[in-house]
Amino acid sequence: MDKIHIENLEFIGNHGVFPEEKFLQQKFIVSVQMETCTRKAGVGDDLNYSTHYGFVSEDIERVFFSKSFDLIEALAEAIAKEILIKYNLIKTVKVTVKKPWAPIKKHFDFVAVEITRSRNKAYLSIGTNIGNLKENLENAIELINKLEHTSVTKVSSLLETEPFGDVIQDNF
């Protein structure tokens, strides 16, 4: 899998658990690594088949300043979620948030959190044998498609089958 990197975006913000972190400005460094396939973009020299890292950088900045996060873990989650929701070509994203001015009474370079989040693909088999079978299945598919961060991309043809086992029921 190919990767697009955005390394070491610097922001000054007010994220942290302690009141002084909410008040005093601190430096944060954000990096993302996005897994995608760049072959079609590379062969055709066409940005329509890639992910515009300038736009992703702007989205990271917007998420960073959207609110004051208590934890850098929550900030990293919000950035990963934004990228996976907005950029369909990205399959996996790794987000690193560094906090070089964390309130630790020791010498250190930075504290950081790194998370990796991916799209999930699921295959469902659903059935019904009560009422209007086709309508029941269509309604179920519609409800699944309405779930947050869920998209039904393909539906097989409908099959009618006899119930399994030694039972007397209508066909599915």
Image: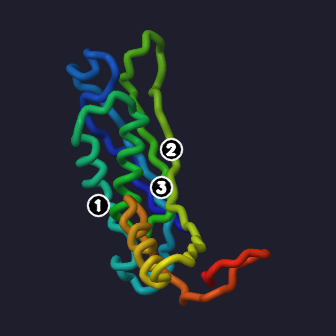
Distance (Cα) linking label 1 and label 3: 16 Å
Distance (Cα) linking label 2 and label 3: 8 Å
Q: Quadrant of the N terminus?
A: bottom right
Mark 1 falls on what kind of element? helix
Q: In this picture, is 141 found above or below 10?
A: below
Pair 1/3: label in front: 3
Residue located farthest toward the right when viewing the structure as drawn: 166
Would you say residue 145 is visible in this rendering? yes
Q: Where is residue 142 in the image (x, y as percent from the top left)?
A: 39, 73
Which residue is under mark 1?
54
The amino acid type found where label 2 is placed reads Ile
Q: Which residue is drawn at 36% across and 39% down?
A: 75
Q: In this picture, is 99 found above or below 131?
A: above
- Colouring chosen for the image of the structure: rainbow
Residue 171 falls in image quadrant: bottom right
Would you say residue 153 is visible in this rendering? no
The amino acid type found where label 1 is placed reads Gly
Of marks 1 and 3, which one's residue comes earlier in the chain?
A: 1
Of marks 2 and 3, which one's residue comes earlier in the chain?
A: 3
Q: Characterize the local packing of mark 1: few (<14), some (14-19) or many (20 or more) Cα atoms within 10 angstroms.
A: few
Distance (Cα) linking label 1 and label 2: 21 Å
Residue 115 badge: 2
Q: Which residue is drawn at 45% across and 77% down?
A: 136
Which residue is under mark 3?
93
Q: In which quarter of the image is the C terminus?
A: bottom right
Q: Residue at x 49, y 68 (%)?
A: 36
Left or right of 128 in this view: 68: left
Left or right of 73 in this view: 25: left
